[in-house]
Image (spheres, rainbow, N blue to C red):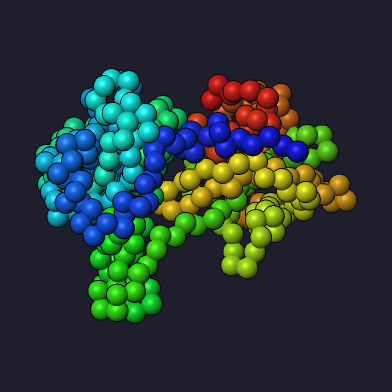
Amino acid sequence: MLRSLTGRLPLSRYRIDRDNATRERPHVFDELWADARTRVLALWRGEVLLTPTQEPALEFLTPDRVPSDALRIYLGRTVDDDPDGGIPAGSPIVAVVVDDATGQTLASDMVRWGNPRTFGHQLCDRDAGLAIEALGIANWHASHQFSPRTGNATEPGRAGWVRVDVETGREIFPRTDAAIIVGVTDERDRLVLGSNAQWESNRFSLLAGFVEPGESLEAAVVREVFEESGLRVVDPQYVGSQPWPFPASLMLGFRASLDPAQAATLRPDGTEILDLRWFSRDELAASLPDIVLPSRTSIARAIIEDWFGGPLDA
Protein backbone atom coordinates (compact mmCIF):
# COMPACT_ATOMS: atom_id res chain seq x y z
CA MET A 1 0.00 0.00 0.00
CA LEU A 2 1.45 3.36 -1.05
CA ARG A 3 1.56 6.06 1.60
CA SER A 4 -0.58 9.15 1.10
CA LEU A 5 1.14 12.28 -0.20
CA THR A 6 -1.75 14.63 0.60
CA GLY A 7 -0.28 15.92 3.85
CA ARG A 8 2.85 17.01 1.98
CA LEU A 9 1.18 18.70 -0.98
CA PRO A 10 1.59 22.50 -0.89
CA LEU A 11 -1.93 23.40 -2.02
CA SER A 12 -3.67 20.79 0.14
CA ARG A 13 -2.64 22.54 3.34
CA TYR A 14 -5.43 24.19 5.30
CA ARG A 15 -5.82 26.07 8.59
CA ILE A 16 -9.31 27.58 8.42
CA ASP A 17 -12.77 26.69 9.74
CA ARG A 18 -15.08 27.06 6.73
CA ASP A 19 -17.94 27.72 9.17
CA ASN A 20 -20.71 26.70 6.79
CA ALA A 21 -23.46 27.58 9.33
CA THR A 22 -22.67 31.29 9.04
CA ARG A 23 -23.26 31.15 5.27
CA GLU A 24 -26.96 30.60 5.94
CA ARG A 25 -27.51 33.92 7.73
CA PRO A 26 -29.57 36.30 5.55
CA HIS A 27 -27.54 39.42 6.37
CA VAL A 28 -24.19 37.78 6.89
CA PHE A 29 -22.07 40.47 5.23
CA ASP A 30 -23.70 43.23 7.23
CA GLU A 31 -22.71 41.30 10.36
CA LEU A 32 -19.19 40.64 9.12
CA TRP A 33 -18.60 44.24 8.04
CA ALA A 34 -19.63 45.33 11.54
CA ASP A 35 -17.18 42.87 13.15
CA ALA A 36 -13.85 44.55 13.90
CA ARG A 37 -12.07 41.21 13.51
CA THR A 38 -13.12 40.70 9.87
CA ARG A 39 -10.33 40.76 7.32
CA VAL A 40 -10.53 40.83 3.54
CA LEU A 41 -8.48 38.95 0.97
CA ALA A 42 -8.56 40.91 -2.29
CA LEU A 43 -8.63 39.10 -5.65
CA TRP A 44 -7.96 40.82 -8.95
CA ARG A 45 -7.69 39.23 -12.38
CA GLY A 46 -7.22 35.77 -10.88
CA GLU A 47 -4.47 36.84 -8.48
CA VAL A 48 -4.28 37.54 -4.75
CA LEU A 49 -2.94 40.63 -3.01
CA LEU A 50 0.41 40.05 -1.29
CA THR A 51 2.27 41.90 1.42
CA PRO A 52 5.22 44.09 0.36
CA THR A 53 7.70 41.67 1.91
CA GLN A 54 10.35 39.44 0.38
CA GLU A 55 8.66 36.20 1.41
CA PRO A 56 5.19 35.68 -0.15
CA ALA A 57 2.32 36.21 2.29
CA LEU A 58 -1.28 37.27 1.84
CA GLU A 59 -2.21 40.87 2.56
CA PHE A 60 -5.33 41.08 4.76
CA LEU A 61 -7.31 44.29 4.54
CA THR A 62 -10.00 45.85 6.69
CA PRO A 63 -13.47 45.88 5.06
CA ASP A 64 -13.45 49.65 4.51
CA ARG A 65 -10.65 49.23 1.93
CA VAL A 66 -12.88 47.48 -0.63
CA PRO A 67 -16.25 48.29 -2.26
CA SER A 68 -19.21 46.71 -0.50
CA ASP A 69 -20.95 46.10 -3.83
CA ALA A 70 -18.17 43.85 -5.17
CA LEU A 71 -18.49 40.06 -5.22
CA ARG A 72 -17.91 38.87 -1.65
CA ILE A 73 -17.30 35.29 -0.53
CA TYR A 74 -17.15 34.25 3.10
CA LEU A 75 -14.18 31.89 3.43
CA GLY A 76 -14.49 31.04 7.12
CA ARG A 77 -12.71 31.75 10.40
CA THR A 78 -9.08 31.43 11.37
CA VAL A 79 -8.28 28.63 13.81
CA ASP A 80 -4.88 29.84 15.00
CA ASP A 81 -3.55 33.11 16.34
CA ASP A 82 -1.44 35.02 13.83
CA PRO A 83 2.21 34.78 14.97
CA ASP A 84 2.54 38.50 14.25
CA GLY A 85 -0.51 39.28 16.35
CA GLY A 86 -2.49 40.83 13.53
CA ILE A 87 -5.25 38.25 13.07
CA PRO A 88 -6.39 36.36 16.19
CA ALA A 89 -8.05 32.95 16.10
CA GLY A 90 -11.73 33.15 15.19
CA SER A 91 -11.34 36.09 12.82
CA PRO A 92 -13.72 36.00 9.82
CA ILE A 93 -12.03 36.09 6.41
CA VAL A 94 -13.88 37.33 3.31
CA ALA A 95 -12.61 37.17 -0.27
CA VAL A 96 -13.56 40.19 -2.41
CA VAL A 97 -13.19 40.24 -6.19
CA VAL A 98 -12.26 43.80 -7.12
CA ASP A 99 -12.41 45.66 -10.44
CA ASP A 100 -9.50 47.26 -12.26
CA ALA A 101 -9.87 50.64 -10.60
CA THR A 102 -9.88 49.17 -7.10
CA GLY A 103 -7.07 46.74 -7.93
CA GLN A 104 -4.84 49.61 -9.08
CA THR A 105 -5.74 51.62 -5.99
CA LEU A 106 -4.91 48.78 -3.60
CA ALA A 107 -1.55 48.08 -5.25
CA SER A 108 -0.39 49.60 -8.52
CA ASP A 109 2.86 47.63 -8.33
CA MET A 110 1.98 44.37 -10.11
CA VAL A 111 4.55 42.51 -8.01
CA ARG A 112 2.05 42.82 -5.15
CA TRP A 113 -0.42 40.63 -7.08
CA GLY A 114 0.44 36.97 -7.49
CA ASN A 115 -0.84 33.54 -8.42
CA PRO A 116 -0.27 30.73 -5.90
CA ARG A 117 0.20 28.38 -8.83
CA THR A 118 3.81 29.56 -8.86
CA PHE A 119 4.54 30.44 -5.22
CA GLY A 120 1.96 28.45 -3.24
CA HIS A 121 4.64 26.21 -1.73
CA GLN A 122 6.16 29.29 -0.07
CA LEU A 123 2.96 30.33 1.73
CA CYS A 124 2.14 29.28 5.29
CA ASP A 125 -0.57 26.65 5.78
CA ARG A 126 -3.28 29.23 6.51
CA ASP A 127 -2.45 31.45 3.55
CA ALA A 128 -2.12 28.54 1.12
CA GLY A 129 -5.54 27.20 2.05
CA LEU A 130 -7.25 30.59 1.93
CA ALA A 131 -5.74 31.55 -1.43
CA ILE A 132 -6.78 28.29 -3.08
CA GLU A 133 -10.28 28.37 -1.58
CA ALA A 134 -10.76 31.97 -2.68
CA LEU A 135 -9.53 31.49 -6.24
CA GLY A 136 -11.49 28.26 -6.68
CA ILE A 137 -14.84 29.75 -5.73
CA ALA A 138 -14.15 33.07 -7.51
CA ASN A 139 -13.34 31.24 -10.76
CA TRP A 140 -16.61 29.33 -10.44
CA HIS A 141 -18.55 32.58 -10.04
CA ALA A 142 -16.90 34.01 -13.15
CA SER A 143 -18.05 31.06 -15.27
CA HIS A 144 -21.61 30.80 -13.90
CA GLN A 145 -23.08 34.26 -14.31
CA PHE A 146 -25.90 32.66 -16.28
CA SER A 147 -27.89 29.52 -15.47
CA PRO A 148 -26.83 26.51 -17.57
CA ARG A 149 -30.46 25.32 -17.43
CA THR A 150 -32.42 28.45 -18.33
CA GLY A 151 -29.89 30.98 -19.59
CA ASN A 152 -31.20 33.47 -17.02
CA ALA A 153 -28.81 35.75 -15.17
CA THR A 154 -27.68 34.52 -11.74
CA GLU A 155 -26.64 36.36 -8.59
CA PRO A 156 -24.59 35.28 -5.56
CA GLY A 157 -26.31 33.78 -2.52
CA ARG A 158 -25.46 32.07 0.77
CA ALA A 159 -22.41 34.25 1.45
CA GLY A 160 -21.02 33.58 -2.01
CA TRP A 161 -21.40 29.79 -2.01
CA VAL A 162 -24.30 29.50 -4.45
CA ARG A 163 -25.61 31.41 -7.44
CA VAL A 164 -29.35 31.96 -7.74
CA ASP A 165 -31.35 32.12 -10.96
CA VAL A 166 -32.92 35.60 -10.75
CA GLU A 167 -36.15 34.45 -12.42
CA THR A 168 -36.74 30.94 -11.09
CA GLY A 169 -34.92 31.18 -7.74
CA ARG A 170 -33.16 27.88 -8.46
CA GLU A 171 -29.80 27.56 -6.72
CA ILE A 172 -26.64 26.51 -8.58
CA PHE A 173 -23.85 25.04 -6.49
CA PRO A 174 -20.09 25.09 -7.15
CA ARG A 175 -18.58 22.27 -9.17
CA THR A 176 -15.04 20.95 -9.31
CA ASP A 177 -13.60 19.04 -12.27
CA ALA A 178 -11.97 15.75 -11.25
CA ALA A 179 -8.69 14.99 -13.01
CA ILE A 180 -6.30 12.10 -12.53
CA ILE A 181 -2.52 12.38 -12.71
CA VAL A 182 -0.40 9.25 -12.69
CA GLY A 183 3.17 8.12 -12.27
CA VAL A 184 3.63 5.10 -14.56
CA THR A 185 6.54 2.75 -13.96
CA ASP A 186 7.75 -0.35 -15.81
CA GLU A 187 9.32 -3.61 -14.56
CA ARG A 188 12.68 -1.82 -14.23
CA ASP A 189 11.02 0.90 -12.10
CA ARG A 190 11.60 3.52 -14.77
CA LEU A 191 9.16 6.46 -14.79
CA VAL A 192 7.52 7.78 -17.96
CA LEU A 193 7.33 11.55 -18.45
CA GLY A 194 5.72 13.43 -21.32
CA SER A 195 5.91 16.86 -22.92
CA ASN A 196 2.59 18.57 -23.60
CA ALA A 197 1.95 20.40 -26.85
CA GLN A 198 1.16 23.60 -24.93
CA TRP A 199 4.54 23.68 -23.15
CA GLU A 200 8.06 24.49 -24.19
CA SER A 201 9.63 21.38 -25.73
CA ASN A 202 11.94 20.61 -22.79
CA ARG A 203 9.21 20.62 -20.09
CA PHE A 204 8.21 17.16 -18.90
CA SER A 205 5.58 15.95 -16.44
CA LEU A 206 3.34 13.02 -15.61
CA LEU A 207 0.41 11.91 -17.73
CA ALA A 208 -2.93 13.38 -16.68
CA GLY A 209 -6.48 13.92 -17.85
CA PHE A 210 -10.05 14.60 -16.83
CA VAL A 211 -12.39 11.93 -15.51
CA GLU A 212 -15.23 11.33 -17.96
CA PRO A 213 -18.91 10.94 -17.00
CA GLY A 214 -19.76 7.45 -15.80
CA GLU A 215 -16.10 6.59 -15.20
CA SER A 216 -14.28 5.50 -12.05
CA LEU A 217 -10.98 7.12 -11.15
CA GLU A 218 -9.12 3.87 -11.83
CA ALA A 219 -10.75 3.49 -15.23
CA ALA A 220 -9.77 7.06 -16.06
CA VAL A 221 -6.14 6.23 -15.22
CA VAL A 222 -6.11 3.25 -17.57
CA ARG A 223 -7.86 5.12 -20.39
CA GLU A 224 -5.86 8.37 -20.19
CA VAL A 225 -2.50 6.61 -20.06
CA PHE A 226 -3.38 4.52 -23.11
CA GLU A 227 -4.77 7.49 -25.06
CA GLU A 228 -1.73 9.68 -24.42
CA SER A 229 1.08 7.12 -24.52
CA GLY A 230 -0.15 3.81 -25.99
CA LEU A 231 0.78 2.05 -22.74
CA ARG A 232 -1.49 -0.40 -20.94
CA VAL A 233 -1.27 -0.08 -17.16
CA VAL A 234 -2.55 -2.19 -14.29
CA ASP A 235 -3.10 -1.79 -10.55
CA PRO A 236 -3.75 1.97 -10.27
CA GLN A 237 -3.15 3.00 -6.65
CA TYR A 238 -4.33 6.30 -5.19
CA VAL A 239 -1.59 8.38 -3.52
CA GLY A 240 -3.26 11.71 -2.65
CA SER A 241 -5.16 14.73 -3.91
CA GLN A 242 -4.65 18.45 -4.30
CA PRO A 243 -6.98 21.27 -5.38
CA TRP A 244 -5.84 22.99 -8.55
CA PRO A 245 -8.24 25.91 -9.17
CA PHE A 246 -6.59 27.03 -12.40
CA PRO A 247 -9.40 27.24 -13.22
CA ALA A 248 -11.41 24.50 -11.44
CA SER A 249 -9.75 21.12 -10.95
CA LEU A 250 -9.13 18.62 -8.18
CA MET A 251 -6.03 16.59 -9.03
CA LEU A 252 -6.23 12.95 -7.89
CA GLY A 253 -2.82 11.35 -7.84
CA PHE A 254 -2.08 7.72 -8.71
CA ARG A 255 0.77 5.33 -9.29
CA ALA A 256 0.33 2.54 -11.85
CA SER A 257 2.45 -0.22 -13.35
CA LEU A 258 2.98 -1.13 -16.97
CA ASP A 259 1.07 -4.31 -17.83
CA PRO A 260 3.83 -6.97 -17.88
CA ALA A 261 2.16 -8.60 -20.88
CA GLN A 262 2.50 -5.39 -22.92
CA ALA A 263 5.50 -3.76 -24.55
CA ALA A 264 7.04 -0.60 -23.08
CA THR A 265 6.98 1.10 -26.48
CA LEU A 266 5.94 4.75 -26.15
CA ARG A 267 3.48 6.24 -28.65
CA PRO A 268 2.75 9.95 -28.09
CA ASP A 269 -0.76 10.85 -29.26
CA GLY A 270 0.69 13.71 -31.31
CA THR A 271 -2.06 16.09 -30.23
CA GLU A 272 -1.72 16.62 -26.48
CA ILE A 273 1.57 14.79 -25.96
CA LEU A 274 4.41 15.39 -28.41
CA ASP A 275 7.25 13.57 -26.66
CA LEU A 276 7.49 10.70 -24.16
CA ARG A 277 10.53 9.27 -22.41
CA TRP A 278 11.33 6.56 -19.89
CA PHE A 279 13.65 7.72 -17.10
CA SER A 280 15.60 5.73 -14.57
CA ARG A 281 16.55 7.68 -11.46
CA ASP A 282 20.09 8.16 -12.72
CA GLU A 283 18.84 9.24 -16.14
CA LEU A 284 16.45 11.79 -14.65
CA ALA A 285 19.15 13.25 -12.41
CA ALA A 286 21.52 13.52 -15.36
CA SER A 287 18.82 15.22 -17.49
CA LEU A 288 17.99 17.99 -15.03
CA PRO A 289 20.21 20.62 -16.68
CA ASP A 290 18.32 20.10 -19.93
CA ILE A 291 14.68 19.52 -18.94
CA VAL A 292 12.13 21.44 -16.89
CA LEU A 293 10.06 19.58 -14.29
CA PRO A 294 6.67 20.61 -12.83
CA SER A 295 6.69 23.39 -10.24
CA ARG A 296 7.04 22.62 -6.54
CA THR A 297 3.38 23.58 -5.99
CA SER A 298 2.14 20.69 -8.13
CA ILE A 299 1.15 17.15 -7.18
CA ALA A 300 3.09 16.03 -10.26
CA ARG A 301 6.34 17.20 -8.66
CA ALA A 302 5.46 15.43 -5.41
CA ILE A 303 4.77 12.11 -7.16
CA ILE A 304 8.00 12.37 -9.18
CA GLU A 305 10.08 13.13 -6.09
CA ASP A 306 8.38 10.36 -4.13
CA TRP A 307 9.37 7.89 -6.85
CA PHE A 308 12.87 9.39 -7.04
CA GLY A 309 13.33 9.05 -3.28
CA GLY A 310 13.99 12.67 -2.39
CA PRO A 311 13.92 16.31 -3.57
CA LEU A 312 15.13 17.16 -7.05
CA ASP A 313 17.14 20.31 -7.60
CA ALA A 314 15.26 21.52 -10.67
Q: Name the residue located 37 percent from the left edge and 51 percent from the top edge.
A: 20
| Horizontal side of residue 304 vs 147, given as left or right | right
Q: Residue at x 38, y 73 (%)?
A: 148
Q: Is residue 228 above or below residue 144?
A: above
Q: Does the image show residue 194?
A: no
Give the left or right position of residue 37, taking residue 231 as reference. left
Residue 279: in sight, yes or no? yes
As drawn, 157 above or below 34:
below
Relative to the observer, which residue lies in front, 154 or 289? 154
x 69%, y 31%: residue: 307
State the residue lying farthest toward the right: 261
- Horizontally, is 291 left or right of 246 in the view? right
Q: Quadrant of the N terminus?
A: top right
Near-viewer residue (140 or 282): 140
Q: Nearer the viewer, residue 127 or 33?
A: 33
- In the image shown, does 200 or 57 lie closer to the viewer? 57
Q: Position of residue 163 (x, y in %)?
A: 31, 65
Residue 63 location (% of width, % of height): 16, 41
Quarter of the image where one finds residue 308: top right
Relative to 126, say whether 178 is above or below: below
